[in-house]
Image: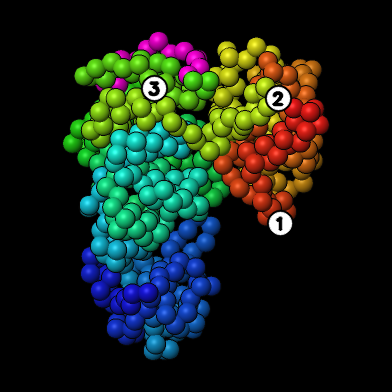
Amino acid sequence: MTIMRATDLLKESEYKWIAGPDDREFDEIVLDSRKVTDKTAFVAMVGQKTDGHKHIVSAAEQGAALVLVEERKLPEIREMLASIEALGTTGVAAVPDTRKAYAEMACSYFGHPSKDMKIIGLTGTKGKTTSTYIIHEILERAGRSCGLIGTVENKIVGRTIKSKHTTPEAWEFQSLLCTMKDEGVKDCVMEVSSLGLKFKRTYGVDFEIGVFTNFLNDHVSDGEHETEEDYFLSKLALFDHCRIALINKNTRRFEEVLAYAKAHTEKCYTYSVSEDADFTMRDMKTTVRDGVPGMGFTFVTPDYEEELFVPLLCDFNVDNAVCAAASAFLAGVERDQIKNGMTFVRVPGRMEKIDNSLGLKIYVDYAHNGDSLKVLLNAIRPSCKGRIITVFGCGGDRPHDRRYTMGEVSGKYSDFTVVTTDNSRSEDFSIIAGMIVEGIRRNGDVPYEIIEDRRAAIRHACAMAHPDDIVVIAGKGHETTMTIKNTVVDFVDSKVTSEELRNLEKERGV
């Protein structure tokens, strides 16, 4: 590892030296005081549930070379600073904002790799993951080496790295960009979460294109955003560092988003699947191309119209496809390259079709609240000749309203619901299931079944399905684990579903 010193890394930050030596060397910067050693620097951040300033003495006692604190905290941590100063071994610096300083240190250390790349960032409540995958596929197949950073995984020149956060912390983020730059990546498309923006994880990066997909009532809870306004303003912050803005004209609070974008970017464009916009579409239809089901539509740009096909079902994926095609257009991709790249898209856990020899239509999707499940089921209905069978559960230690609304939506828009486990965490499954069932029963006497074991629930839904039916396994999508009480178990819906379908094929001699 490269040796670092505080004075070198803070050269781009406003700071005051408070106490201790300023020349100690370290090779790592940590945000968790439990990871402190005599070769680390500790940055004290005010988090959603914890405050790192409570642990600065412990960090110093463990030998931290540097402790970085916020100026506004100085009065209340005066005694703690005296204790650190008495040790005489740890340097202490104060900055106006430790999150911003942490990002500046990361940019400085990794040499601002984004300056040699064109980065497309997408924020919004829904659609980020699918849209980024489509953009990535288009750019890659257009011959432009493109990285991807997002919820499911990070991609660097054919390699995939499992994601920890939708938008990584600043140090990991800059490290990823640096690796991409070193490997010749010139373009990067990424999901930019509201919390990533609020906590300045992308600070110091200038986006070539910033996309605002939509704004729905979500992510306002303990551990997320305090209010809807905080959530909204956090998303708008993407445009503070963008050259070009692309906004979905169908989003809530569109006029406010547009006004903010116009005030903070050089150019601003709109897209829509239903209104006049700079980029739009017409003639949408469900179709099959080379045996692959998907959506066809005419993509309308300021310069041309082109027939496109995306191998993803549902109307909302046309919205994602128009968003991606418009982004690619603004990035300078030719029309034939947009058309070609889009036909190869596959998105883990987003209307992911599970292949089988039984002739069954089985999909895994990430829909994990009432709004997203309603959109999904309504989009599927026109292409379903039989029943819609929906399998889902709700997470424990999360807002209870989600359980009632998901139950109500599934009871209304599905023909049969299987209620099962989904990250119940510290709560009892029976309590969560009871709330979901109460929501289902708001629709009257509609059919449902409760099967706690998620694998058994998936198998049951597949076994009861006929070729005209559509089975939707919702809630977890791309997730690779499930938390039950204090135990984290490996569980991937697509993998488990494939295994159970293989077992059904053997049993039925297919």
In the picture provided, is 123 more to the left or to the right than 378? left
In the picture provided, is 154 more to the left or to the right than 470? left
Q: Check disc 1 and report the residue beneath it.
A: 487
In the rendered view, would you say 195 is above or below 78?
above
Tell me which amino acid carries mark 1.
Thr
Q: Earlier in the sequence, mark 3 or mark 1?
A: 3
* Residue neighbourhood size for the residue with mark 2, other residues' Cα within 10 Å, grouped as few (<14), some (14–19), many (≥20): some
- Give how far across and how far down residue 31 sits, in percent: 45, 66
Name the residue furthest left: 266
* Residue neighbourhood size for the residue with mark 1, other residues' Cα within 10 Å, grouped as few (<14), some (14–19), many (≥20): few
Name the residue furthest front: 509
Note whether residue 496 is visible.
Answer: yes
Question: Which disc number belongs to residue 250?
Answer: 3
Q: Quadrant of the C terminus?
A: top right
Q: Check disc 2 and report the residue beneath it.
A: 358
**For the residue labelled by badge 1, is the local secondary structure a helix, a strand or a loop?**
strand
Q: Residue at x 78, y 21 (%)?
A: 447
In the rendered structure, does residue 393 fall within the stretch colored magenta?
A: no
Q: Residue at x 56, y 48 (%)?
A: 222
Which stretch did the figure color magenta?
275-289
Tell me which amino acid carries mark 3.
Asn
Name the quadrant containing residue 233: top left
Q: Earlier in the sequence, mark 1 or mark 2?
A: 2
**For the residue labelled by badge 3, is the local secondary structure a helix, a strand or a loop?**
loop
In the picture provided, is 194 more to the left or to the right than 455? left
Whether pointer 1 and pointer 2 mark residues with C-beta atoms closer than 8 Å, the reply is no
Q: Earlier in the sequence, mark 3 or mark 2?
A: 3
**For the residue labelled by badge 2, is the local secondary structure a helix, a strand or a loop?**
loop
In the rendered view, would you say 360 is above or below 9?
above
Name the quadrant containing residue 3: bottom left
Question: Which disc number belongs to residue 475?
Answer: none
